[in-house]
Image (tube, grey):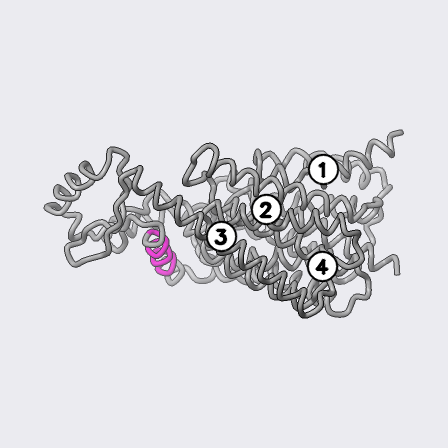
Amino acid sequence: MIAALKINIIKTAIIIFPLLSIASFHAGIPVLALLILSLIGLFTGKYRIRIDKSEMIFLSLFFLYFLVVLINVIYFSGDFRDLDTPSRFALVIPIYFLFKNEELNNQWIIYGLIIGSIFTGIYSFADVFIYQIHHLDNAGIISFYSSILGLSCLSLISDANSKKINQILLISSILGFLGSFLSGGRGVWISAVICLGIIFFINPMKLKVKEFFKFVSLIILVFILAIFIDNHRIGIDRLDSGEVVFTPSTTGMLNKIKETAGVVNYIEQEIQNSSNENIINQQVYSSSGQRLEMWKAASIIIKDNPIFGVGEGNFNEETKLLIKENIISPNIDYYTHPHNEYLSALVEQGLIGFVLLLFIYFLPLRYFLSELKKSQSRQKKHVSLVGAIILIHYIFYSFTSGVFDHQTTTLFFSFMLILLFAQAKKIESLK
């Protein structure tokens, strides 16, 4: 009875994790349950800790990431609360041994991806067309998750599945794509195109040329329709809110501002601003302009502190010093990270953290891609393809977001990779 209860807890946690990562941002609850089970299994000696070289490297990367941040916090006399997010990398390590020693079913992973992908599509559609929310909260994250889940569902469509399962996966993938487009995020488009290319190259559906072009046409149609709908609602949103877009000029006019009071209030404010020091300061108000200014600040900080960085959570303090020296715009004084994970690593942990970040991304990606090429197991190919999709999304999304500066995206990355890697190794051991 206890064994059955434990399996049900594991099954439920795997299935609901993607949904909770998007819906309520309480995905740590099922992970905590699995952590407790894994610690019990390890302390009682039930779980074997025997691992091979690739597993040692994989788990070491996760532990080293947390260790580097810990040393960084101690060295710079930082706040130990800054360990909260990177601790996710260390906390999922015991769960790896739970996954390795318990009987997992690939269907649990598939169910979780399907439910999560369907939810993102319905959630975004309801917010945009029913509740008339033209700009979703956490739009970038929702678009990010939607793309991962939608493409993962697409990659799982196979000629070995029943027709019904493939139809469910196709519907789930389309809803995931719609969720990504309707949320308004644009940071995932490059990774989405690359993942689509990999999926069609591997061709798990074994499509013939005619079927292949029909499928591609369907994806393009959904893409165009979503863009049309998205542009239409953005236009309505700008008219309703009185948002006016100005291009940069030598007068230093603001290039974008949202005025809930309407256009008249905006014009009055702009006339007033044009006569003061804002013209000289060239303040940056657009999201892209702010990112460029943050990257400028980060590049200056990195140049002055290349090896060890300035310490965890100290980007904002360094930025304020640059603002006082009139080197960068004061408009970014409240940002705690430069919205670029590669720059964040260089700023906070220096070259050491940057190299470790590259290893965390590219060593697992190399493993999954190699398994896609050489493995004869259909199940292992599916697991490896989903792992590659997640990694490719993180690699490219990291150029415009600090993915490991947020608990949700850090936990999603660490937990899903632990799960997929453990399942791939287990399938490998069953040969």
Q: Is residue 259 magenta?
A: no
Left or right: 14 in relation to 8: left
Q: Earlier along the polypeptide chain: callout 3 or callout 1?
A: 1
Classify the position of the C terminus by image quarter. bottom right
Magenta-colored span: 290-300
Residue plotted at (72% across, 49% down): 419
Residue 243 place in picture, x, y as percent: 28, 42
Front disc: 2 or 1: 2
Left or right: 294 in relation to 142: left
**Residue 44 in sight:** yes
Q: Identify which amino acid the numbered label 1 is placed on.
A: Ala
Q: Which residue is mark 3?
A: 225
Q: Residues under labels 1 and 4: Cα distance?
A: 20 Å
Q: Identify which amino acid the numbered label 3 is placed on.
A: Leu
Q: Residues under labels 2 and 1: Cα distance?
A: 23 Å
Q: Earlier along the polypeptide chain: callout 2 or callout 1?
A: 1
Q: How many residues crowd mark 2 within 10 Å: few (<14), some (14–19), many (20+)?
A: many
Residue 78 place in picture, x, y as percent: 47, 43
Give the main secondary structure of the magenta stretch: helix
Residue 170 place in picture, x, y as percent: 66, 51
